[in-house]
Image (tube, coloured by chain):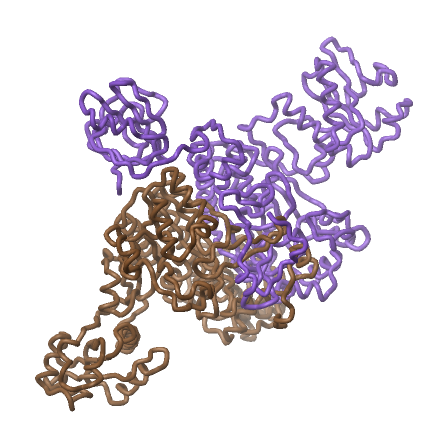
Chain colours: A purple, B brown
């Protein structure tokens, strides 16, 4: 090794040792007679000391060192007179006796500090410099630790990590696949997996019993903030289980991660039905760090002549604790918030329940105090609380109220990044109607599509509804939600060929299409498929949640931007005519945009 | 869980417990009054017992169970009268009281036994059934254990696992890339990585110090036995190291794997130069489980009028211990062996050193006993040994002799799969001349190409030769070889922009091409790149070696055949017009073969 120690390990007990350190020049301070250089590596920072009186030649060398130079320094560990108690190596320094510049550096385009002056674009282009910043590197160290602990837990539970193929077959029933032209099988394509779903199910048919994999998956989606075309899943499957077995096993995994990585104890995770999540939070991934559940007011607001409420399918309130003193300005801001096009409410009604017991609403014209008291009561409001009320079409109003609830949670400081509230949302609908989602192939518009995926089993008691009322069929499907973020989801699978064929038929597949795309799986079900189910966690998202960040990008070493481009290596890029020729592909030149 | 225990865990101490097992019917024996069913899962086999006298209804049910049916059985653990000492559960059986068929099975196309009657093609098509066979599943369990222990070792050595991107940029300087058309960036393509090489080097520039990843890589190669278009590497990189540091660190990894996974102690691994490997074994991955090193005979065979030897650039011998009694037939077989077109020798000369001290050669006409004694002496032959001699062009003769040596190793039983001989081959040439390798783009023919890759550093003392004699430049490159298999290889990297630019120039890149393809890396070298180096192990190959198998295919859950096809899912396959349209691609229909 070119060093005897890292820049993070020397202590007072090492004083008088001769050591060799390697690292980058973080800062250099020239105090005339003395020059101090902070030498940085992944493990820490150690101060190098140069003295003009005792060794002027060496001191001159030290003065020449520029920011981010790579240096090898030999010298003696001595006790510092001016100790820095904020870093573990702060009690010692190195009197440098030999100094070698291993590599120089031009001036970086932004500062290598926790608070950098580099903008997003510059940081992405010079990602290798951005990764030198401790705050970014710590994120990837966290990710490493999460992966290690995930494997430790699952290995102890007898899960086998099995690698599934990356070059698979395009089955465009869901989001778009990335495809890979085959040179050896001309005119044919592989596809990159959106998940290893069918393979992990086949492993269950193979009797592997418990499978997992931390695995890259791919989805060719349109521009979307904080989505990556390639992302990582903790992908798992178990045999001979019922839903509760899976929930318990993976609740255990997440608790283990919180405990070992963050030292946080997570209590038992509640189970909430999808129907309740929508009813009480307007959201299938409710942020349960705070209550503020919805109260439906239809029973107490209708029939007094307030047309907005009378004509509404749903009138719904939240109770913001202690916010009765909100100013007119604050309430106007909230009204503007709900009227934004992304939220789309037409207005906001409020009622202040003053500390003096008075109730003042924005619709006093229509409701007298006795009537308002009913609102307060049904909402369990206390003195000093503020009721916020939206009305209209049930679905849209719930969505809008969910946004308002989260906004109030922010305003009232109820969404602390270091508090973690976990739950399971269960009993999802099996299907949803696709009006024309642009992330799906256009040919799938106007059809039922699987809410989870086509291999999810319907609840046995709902199977009869598959023909008569597909939208009402509930699935054995579940999501884990933490702080309003869906971190994982899964289902108990179909393991019967006929039911799987029925499911494909409901999804609009002909028998031939189903057989062509998924024949291998349906055939496998004929050879003794066990009951099985599984789950996948979004690993990038889970890491960012543990790291207390909103964006996943800084938990990925080399992320792509929202247009799917890697700005550092400048990819994607054009390929050579020779490559296109070998693949027997022609670009539709007339429509190719020159980049 | 649908079971209380697995099929591998019940013992005598569990007798009289009520248990529930789930699994597959391995075999069923109907002995009239008694029916026995072997129930199998990943963890083992447990015998279910049915008695026609005591429970005729249940016994009838048991008799109906077909091979590979999936069954849930409740019952009582009892001691077996007829114990099976060959399996851990062989002392007990289950008196079945409740029996549920969870899924039926049609008859499998081949038997689910260690020795199956299924051919290769059938096994690949029904891989999910093939994986039920214990011998195949054990391979994947070994692979899981290898991955866990690899991570344990590297984590303890402060390596960070960092995921590098799969959608990268095509840089066709080596083997062919698989490419991925971008829908969002039309006319442009991603490429799948042949290795994370540039990214791991950038992580070193970022100061990550020690990186590893167990990662899928991709190479679009022509048909080749036992190669897969996607394969897995243990990919590693370290900063502030010299070659010996890397060799020691990864010698440690492989020793750790042998110790923890196989219980085998591996001694210190010798270092052998590439030049010596070629000289003494005719092979840069010598199988050192046995000696039989080459002896060059030029000095002792020339000038007596035997034209074949006189005109040969190289005359080389191996000494096969104790094979002097080889029959004429055996020697003819060896002659046929070396004359096969793949080996290409024109003939084989031998000399028997009989136990009586006599020496008989196939060229007695030209060499008298005194001369032959010189051969025996220079080869260190002992009484009873057989000398085998080839002559001709040096390079071709060494290659042919290497094949003959391995063949003799096989014939003499010197290549035991449970013996492991590890070594490092070092000081590889930096470059090799590409006559027209069909696995490279045609445009690279008639050029120097990197033997390892373009980022490998030349030995400092050889840099001057880069212009005058590129083929003579040695690299700081090394391979780990076990039992004649190259399991890993790596190098100390270039970390200086000018030297990297020089290297690209030697490889025939214009400045513009080098900048366009690898500008990001050369720019990174300007910001303080540390000295660094690394290695990658072929994980599939390493697992197959540990498993004592020749083929990697059974250490991959879902392998592709030699044409790159997945026979189970039938991939690659055609994609829809809609997909092609969105990607703005046209197939060159006239040349597309219909499959």
Vertical relation: A339 (above or below) B194: above
Q: Which residue does the image show at 47% across and 27% down from the upper left?
A: A115
Asked which quadrant contains residue B569, the reply is: bottom right
Q: Which residue does the image show at 22% across and 22% down from the upper left?
A: A51
Q: Position of residue A498 (x, y in %)?
A: 70, 63
Vertical relation: B481 (above or below) B517: below
Q: Position of residue B102 (x, y in %)?
A: 62, 60
Vertical relation: B412 (above or below) B82: below
Vertical relation: B352 (above or below) A364: below
Left or right: A369 with respect to A287?
right
* In the image, farthest residue toward the left: B370
- Residue B371 in sight in this render: yes
| Front residue (pair B185, B281) | B185
Q: Position of residue A475 (x, y in %)?
A: 69, 49
Asked which quadrant contains residue B450, the reply is: bottom left
* In the image, farthest residue toward the bottom: B365
Q: Position of residue A3 (x, y in %)?
A: 26, 38
Left or right: A487 with respect to A101?
right
| Front residue (pair B339, A431) | B339
Left or right: A368 with respect to B379?
right
- Residue B73 in sight in this render: no
| Front residue (pair B47, B305) | B305
* In the image, farthest residue toward the top: A356
Q: Which residue does the image show at 67% across and 63% down from the upper left?
A: A497
Q: Which residue does the image show at 70% across and 40% down from the upper left?
A: A274
């Amino acid at each position: 090794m070119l060093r005897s120690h890292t820049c993070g390990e020397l202590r007072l007990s090492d004083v008088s040792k001769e050591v060799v350190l390697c690292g980058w020049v973080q800062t250099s301070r020239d105090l005339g007679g003395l020059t101090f250089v902070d030498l940085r590596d992944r493990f820490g920072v150690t101060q190098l000391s140069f003295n003009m009186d005792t060794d002027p030649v060496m001191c001159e060398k030290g003065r020449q060192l520029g920011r981010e130079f790579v240096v090898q320094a030999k010298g003696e560990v001595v006790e510092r007179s001016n100790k820095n108690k904020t870093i573990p190596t702060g009690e010692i320094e190195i009197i440098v006796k030999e100094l070698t510049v291993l590599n120089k550096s031009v001036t970086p385009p932004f500062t290598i500090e926790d608070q950098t002056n580099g903008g997003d674009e510059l940081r992405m282009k010079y990602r290798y410099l951005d990764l030198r910043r401790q705050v970014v590197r710590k994120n990837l160290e966290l990710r490493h630790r999460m992966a290690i602990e995930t494997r430790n837990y699952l290995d102890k539970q007898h899960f086998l990590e099995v690698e599934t193929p990356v070059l698979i077959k395009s089955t465009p029933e869901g989001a778009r696949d990335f495809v890979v032209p085959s040179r050896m099988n001309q005119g044919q394509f592989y596809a990159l997996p959106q998940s290893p779903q069918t393979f992990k199910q086949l492993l269950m048919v193979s009797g592997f019993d418990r499978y997992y994999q931390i695995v890259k998956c791919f989805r060719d989606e349109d521009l979307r903030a904080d989505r990556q075309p390639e992302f990582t899943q903790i992908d798992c499957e178990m045999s001979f289980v019922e839903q509760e077995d899976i929930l318990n096993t993976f609740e255990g995994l997440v608790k283990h991660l919180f405990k070992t990585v963050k030292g946080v104890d997570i209590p038992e995770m509640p189970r909430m039905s999808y129907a309740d999540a929508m009813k009480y939070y307007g959201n299938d991934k409710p942020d349960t760090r705070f209550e503020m559940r919805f109260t439906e007011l239809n029973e107490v607001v209708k029939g007094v002549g307030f047309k907005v409420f009378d004509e509404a399918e749903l009138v719904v309130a939240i109770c913001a604790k202690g916010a009765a003193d909100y100013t007119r300005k604050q309430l106007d801001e909230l009204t503007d918030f709900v009227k934004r096009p992304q939220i789309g409410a037409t207005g906001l009604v409020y009622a202040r329940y003053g500390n003096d017991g008075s109730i003042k609403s924005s619709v006093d014209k229509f409701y007298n105090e006795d009537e308002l008291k009913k609102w307060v009561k049904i909402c369990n409001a206390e003195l000093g609380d503020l009721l916020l009320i939206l009305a209209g079409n049930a679905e849209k109003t719930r969505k809008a109220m969910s946004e308002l609830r989260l906004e109030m949670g922010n305003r009232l400081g109820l969404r602390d990044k270091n508090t973690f509230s976990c739950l399971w949302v269960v009993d999802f609908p099996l299907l949803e109607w696709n009006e024309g989602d642009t992330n799906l192939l256009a040919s799938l518009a106007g059809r039922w599509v699987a809410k989870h995926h086509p291999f999810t089993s319907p609840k046995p008691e709902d199977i009869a509804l598959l023909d008569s009322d597909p939208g009402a069929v509930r699935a054995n499907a579940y999501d884990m939600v933490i702080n309003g973020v869906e971190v994982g989801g899964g289902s108990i699978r179909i393991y019967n060929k006929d039911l799987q064929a029925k499911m494909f038929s409901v999804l609009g597949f002909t028998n031939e299409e189903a057989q062509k795309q998924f024949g291998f799986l349906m055939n496998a079900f004929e050879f003794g498929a066990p009951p099985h189910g599984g789950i996948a966690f979004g690993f990038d998202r889970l890491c960012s949640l543990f790291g207390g960040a909103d964006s996943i990008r800084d938990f990925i070493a080399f992320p792509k931007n929202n247009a799917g481009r890697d700005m550092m290596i400048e990819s994607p890029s054009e390929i050579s005519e020779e490559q296109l020729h070998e693949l027997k592909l022609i670009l539709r030149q007339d429509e190719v945009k020159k980049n």
